[in-house]
Amino acid sequence: MFVGIFRNTGNKSSQLFYFCAMGRRNKNKVFEAVEVTGAGGKGKGIGKSPDGRVIFIDNVVPGDVADIKTTKKRKSYYQGTAVNFHQFSEKRVEPVCQHFGTCGGCKWQNMGYEYQLEYKQDEVFNNLIRVGKVELPKVTPILGSKEIYFYRNKMEFSFSDSRWLTPEEINSGKDFDDKNALGFHIPGMWDKILDIKKCHLQEDPSNAIRNFIKEFATSNGLSFFNARKQEGLLRTLMIRTSSTGEIMVLIQFFHEDKAKRELFLDAVIEMFPEITSLQYVINEKGNDTIYDQEVICYKGRDHIFEQMEGLQFKINAKSFYQTNSAQAYELYKITRDFADLKGDEIVYDLYTGTGTIAQFVAKKAKKVIGVEVVPEAIIDAKENAERNQINNTEFFVGDMKKVFSEEFINNHGQPDVIITDPPRDGMHKDVIAQIIGILPQRIVYVSCNSATQARDLSLLDEYYKVTRVQPVDMFPQTHHVENVVCLERK
């Protein structure tokens, strides 16, 4: 399915028309004058069909009234897209990005930020109540981000030799000789790349670097990757920035071509001498992940530094670090506040990553034990602790459900407080069982997925009471939201 948008920008209330290419087997219905009553998962609007089923709708804002053409039918719901608008919501704003509607990165850019926060707050609360079924204190109002654009410190772009054409280009009837793209995947299409002119997520010189790289590569005949044919030289671009002003650029090549590689990398560093770290990867495998690949430093050092409350954190190409640096600081302050440390506690930091939270709370604890599955992250954590002259942290690598065992606890001490910040899937049931087995006095649960967080809270509910809840918006213009919960032993 493809959805295109034509907008009369001269009049906000003018109609938007959507053109949908559907498979012949789809028997699409059109529901007229559907009111969009809410916002649901993955940034979709929510409406109701005449037969009572929920409709999850693309490219609408709560308060819109539109005709909806269905794209998928299931037993209890439809999926659809707006084909004609009768009324626009008062919650609508004009998107700032020229790529909005085709690029799937900022699906809520057409909704006022105050309303984005409202729906994120509702999502957290509803998940904790409906999924977790736990008793809650009053949920603290969501902490919004001061910066709602240009807030990300890491962006990844893909090269393609057969770029995705916009609806305007398709309907122009023109032939386009420039088929190269450097940008983002079209949602749901692994081999289709939208060429990006300007992205509003990462501050300059991010756009300048990306646009120069595309122009130089095209004018010098460097081939762009073709994912289906598995050919081409240039594969991906990653740009990382830090609050200290440092910049990392990593280019992923599909195969080695020393002459072209050096020509390309030399041009990048000459144009942008402020780059702190210029690195590359030769990746000949079928996917773009670099975690099993050798990263080679071409110019500068192989890392950049992030800073927070006087602490320095080394960030390399494979490091995980919260992508909104300013809001990460707020998130960690909330985590530390919820932990309520007095100075004599043993703290376990599960899923510690590069040990950022562990080191952030260490000065208020007797000892902090961090556990993480990624070996490179633990190496960084140890280096960061040494650099920051923190002597009361220890870091261990391994699969959480295996490492976090009775023997491990016997060796390192019974935790008074557990801080856990798991991936989107939440904590493994064996990890939860171990927590129940040792019953620390307090748990601080940081989550990027309040649904799986709620599931885990329900498993802990017999032994713990939720005493504080604080949603945090890390990703303005998207539906994603972080949530911090404090649990006290009953």
Image: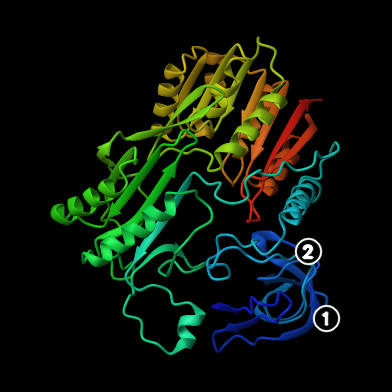
Q: Which mark is residue 360?
A: none
Residue 483, percent across and down? 69, 41
Of circles 2 and 1, the one toward us is 2
Q: Which secondary structure lies at badge 1?
A: loop
Q: Amino acid at mark 1?
A: Pro
Mark 2 touching mark 1, by CB under 8 A? no
Residue at 31% across / 35% down in the picture? 302
Q: Position of residue 193 (x, y in %)?
A: 42, 68
Q: Is residue 327 visible to us here?
A: yes
Q: Is residue 315 left or right of residue 105?
A: left
Circle 2 sits on which residue?
38
Q: Which residue is mark 1?
A: 50
Left or right of 447? Residue 134 is right
Identify the residue shown where x is 42% and y is 49%. Answer: 205
Closer to us: 128 or 191:
191
- Going from N to C along the chain, the mark reached first, 2 or 1, is 2
Residue 438, quarter of the rendered image: top right
Indicate left or right for 8 with 388 as reference.
right
Quick one: quadrant of the N terminus? bottom right
Residue 52, how many percent across, how many down?
83, 75
